[in-house]
């Protein structure tokens, strides 16, 4: 039995003892969430740069609010930072975008599952497609 399976079994049994109930089977999203907290030795960063539609009133606010509403609760997210473009006098700093997202996962497998998670898909449909003109994604991490 793999270390992760033993750990999950022990967790389900411990949880059942505390609740005095039968152990429950852990689902795919439980596995991703537990796996994400194992270690920070491996890490995968997903950085998204957003350009909002100029004709949409409060597009930046809608985007920031949507990111905070839909994404943090998705299993496997280690950390998430959303911000607006910071002013800079340095010519090397791109200031053409409006909002950026920096989100980290344990590894690329967890990030791939995040992409298909219903909350992420709902964010794309209900917020992103409504308020954004363009997006650029930078993914990097400890790849094997």
Image (cartoon, rainbow, N blue to C red):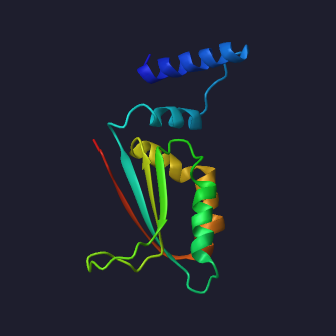
Q: Position of residue 110 (x, y in %)?
A: 46, 43
Quadrant of image for the N terminus: top left
Q: Position of residue 8 (x, y in %)?
A: 53, 22
127 versus 104 height, above or below: below
37 versus 122 height, above or below: above
Q: Position of residue 37 (x, y in %)?
A: 46, 34
Query: Count the marks: how many?
Result: 0
Residue at 64% x, 57% y is 69
Residue at 38% x, 33% y is 39
Say left or right for 69 vs 89.
Answer: right
User: Can residue 124 be spotted in the picture?
Assistant: no
Quarter occupied by residue 144: top left
Q: Position of residue 14 (x, y in %)?
A: 60, 15
Q: Nearer the viewer, residue 134 or 1?
A: 134
Say left or right for 105 vs 60.
Answer: left
User: Can residue 96 be spotted in the picture?
Assistant: yes
Q: Nearer the viewer, residue 50 or 86?
A: 86
- Work out which residue is located at the far bottom of the displayed protein and give it: 55
Quarter occupied by residue 53: bottom right
Residue at 57% x, 50% y is 72
Residue at 38% x, 52% y is 45
Q: Nearer the viewer, residue 2 or 22?
A: 22
């Amino acid at each position: 039995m793999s270390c992760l399976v033993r750990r999950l079994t022990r967790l389900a049994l411990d949880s059942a003892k505390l609740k005095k109930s039968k152990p429950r089977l852990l689902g795919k999203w439980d596995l991703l969430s537990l796996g994400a907290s194992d270690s920070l030795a491996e890490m995968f960063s997903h950085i998204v740069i957003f350009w909002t539609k100029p004709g949409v009133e409060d597009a930046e606010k809608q985007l920031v609010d949507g990111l905070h509403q839909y994404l943090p609760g998705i299993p496997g997210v280690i950390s998430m930072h959303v911000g607006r473009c910071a002013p800079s006098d340095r010519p090397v700093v791109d200031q053409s975008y409006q909002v950026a997202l920096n989100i980290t996962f344990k590894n690329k497998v967890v990030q791939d599952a995040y992409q298909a998670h219903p909350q992420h898909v709902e964010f794309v449909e209900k917020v992103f497609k409504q308020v954004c003109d363009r997006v650029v994604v930078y993914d990097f991490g400890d790849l094997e």
